[in-house]
Amino acid sequence: MIENPTVITAGAYTHRPQPARQVLMDIRAVAQRVLTDLPDEYLLELLPDDLVTVYLTSKPSGSSVPHHPRPGFLLPGEPARRPGFMAPTRATSTAVAVTIALHILNDPDVQTGGSLIRTIHQARRPHLAQPVIASSIEDWGRELSPVLEAIHLASIAPALRPSLQLRYRTATGFPRRPGTDPYPARERARKIPAICWPSWTARLGTLDGYPADTLASALSVLLLTAGQEVTYKNAIEMLGSPTDPLTVSRVTRRLARQQSWNDFSLALTRLADHLDDRPAVIDYERRRTLNYEHLLPSHRWQAILAQTAAPEDLSRLTEAARHGLIRRISGTQQALPTCTVQLRSQQAQFRRLAPPETLVMLEREAEEFLAGQGIKGEPVAWSPPLHLLDGLRITGTDSASRTIPLPHALDTYGLSSDSEQYRSGFTPESTGSTDLSPAEALAPAMTSRYAWLRLERFAAATAYPSMMQAAGETGVPARQLSDHALRLERELGRRLLIRATPKTPQRLTPDGERLVAAIRAVSAEEVTRLVRRKRRAASETDDEATVQSDGS
C-alpha cells in the first residue's frame, strides 16, 4: 500500500490522501489494538494458515486456542500467551499485527474498515473492557489521520445514540467529529425554517401519534444538529422552534427504530451539506423577526376573493388565510397568533375551499409584503431539491405526485394531506396511457347523473381566457365552473387546466386537451352504455367470487 514515500493514495486513503508518516502511525495504532484486544480465534479468520501456525507455535505455552479453528487447519504446537501493550518481541507478532492492520486499512470503503474494527471492540478482553466512545481513539496514539478516525466512528456507530449518529455523520462514507467553531451552525440556522419544508417532511415519512407540524419541527432541529456540536436545546433556540428538547428526543428515538433510519439520517446529512455548500436562498432568521401585523388586512382579502371568483364562504376566513400566509413566508409558527379551536376550524375550511386562483393571488400579496420590508431577490418560499434523496429507501410519500402544480409550488397555506387539492393526487404532466378510446377515457368521470353535464360545461368554459369570462358567456356561475374543473381533476387523477392569473389566461394541459377532444368525439349515450357494461361485468365477477368462497 505504501509506494509513494510522501503521500498515500491507496486503500482507505484513496479519496483522502494522507502523509506517509500519518499512515504509518495509523498502522501502528491498529496493530497495537490487534495484539492487545483480539483473541486467537479471531486471528484464524483474518490470517492465512501458515502465518497463524507460525505465530501460535512460536510462543511460550500458557493459552488455549479452539479445538477446530478452521476446517483442514492443523496446529503442530501448543499456543501461548500473547504480548500486551509493549512492543512485540517476536517478528511473527509484528507480522500478524501489521497484516491485520493492512487488511483493515486496505479497503477503500471506510464502512467496511469500520466493521472489521468493530470485531476488535467486541472481542476485548474483560480486564480491558471500557465504554467505546468517539474519543476512545485518542488512546490509540498520537498524530492519527482523519481516515482512521472515520473508520473508528463507523465501527462504533451501532452503539451510539441516534443523536450522536447524526452528529458524527456515521451514515455517510466518511464519518467525522464536528469542529468546535459555532459559526457553521449559526450560518446553517439562517437557511432552515423552524418548521421543515412540506415537501421534505412528506418524503421523510410520518410517525403514528405525532401531528405533521410536530414531526416537521423536530426534523428542522435534527437537520441543524447533523454534523454539528449543537444540543437540541440550542438548536431550538437558534431556529425559534415551537418544539422542545423532550419532543425532539422522542421523535428521534421513534425514527431510529425504523428500518430506514440509516437512509433517513443520510438524507438529513446530504441536505445539511447541500445547505452548507450554498448561499442562503431565503434568510429565515431575518424572516422570523419581521413584523407581520399589517399583512393581509381584511379589505385586501376581500379584494382577492372578488378578483378570483372564490367561494363566498371564504370571505369570513381572513384569519385562516393570514395564518397560512405568515407561515409560508416565515417558515415558523412563532410569528403567528394563538391558534384557537375556532381558528383551527377555519383553517380546515380554508384547506377545503381555497381554489388555486386565490392561492396565486396570495402569493402576489406575499411578494409585495416582502418588498415593503426591504427583502429583494428572495422568493416567497423555497424548498431544497428532492433529488438529494435519490437512491435512499425513504418511507415517505413523493410529494411531487400530490402537490398542486402552480407556478410557485404552493405546498403550504395549510394545504396538507387532508385538503381536496392534495387528495386529488394529480400531477403537472400525466404519464397515463393515451391508447384509450374516447368513451373509455371519459368513463372514470361518470360518477353521477350530472357527470356528462360537468364534462360539457368544462369543455365549453375552457375555450375562454378565464372562468369569469366563461361565466358571462355561458350563464353558469364562475364558482360552479371552477368546482367542475376541480372535481374532474380529482376523479381522473390528472391536471387538466392551468388556471388564469392577472397576467396570463387559463389554458389546458395536454391531458385537458385530450379530455376535451374525447368529450367532442362521443355522445353521452355511448359513454353511459360503456359504463353500464363495465358495472355489470364487475358485478358478475363479484358474484362468482362469492359463490366460490361459499363453496369452500
Image (cartoon, rainbow, N blue to C red):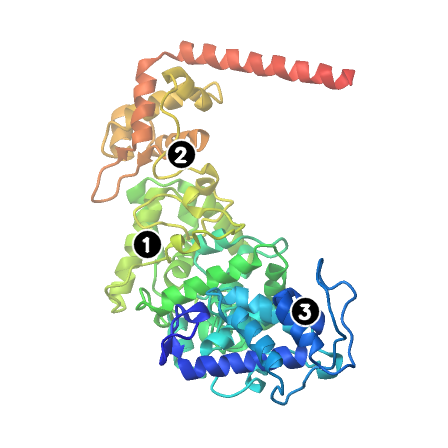
Is residue 38 in sight in this rendering? no
Task: Report how far apart the C-alphas of labels 2 and 1 lie in the structure.
Answer: 27 Å
The N terminus: image quadrant: bottom left
Q: CA distance from mark 1 to mark 3?
A: 78 Å
Please name the residue that numbered disc 3 is placed on: 42
Residue 327 in sight: yes
Q: Is residue 469 above or below residue 111?
A: above
Q: Residues within 10 Å of mark 2 (few under 14, many from 20)?
A: some
Residue highlighted by disc 1: 299
The residue sitting at the left extreme is 503
Seen at 28% across and 29% down, the residue is 462
Residue 455, image quadrant: top left
Q: Residue furthest bottom?
A: 86
Q: Position of residue 242 (x, y in %)?
A: 52, 68
Above-or-below relation of 497 to 327: above
Q: Residue visible at 44% across and 43% down?
A: 402
Task: Specify the quadrant of the image occupied by residue 454.
Answer: top left
CB atoms of marks 2 and 3 within 8 Å: no
Contact flag, marks 1 and 3 (Cβ < 8 Å): no
Residue at which label 2 appears = 486
Amino acid type at circle 2 is: Leu
Q: Tag 1's secondary structure?
A: helix
Q: Quadrant of the C terminus?
A: top right
Question: Where in the figure is residue 267, as x and y percent of width and height?
Answer: 47, 59
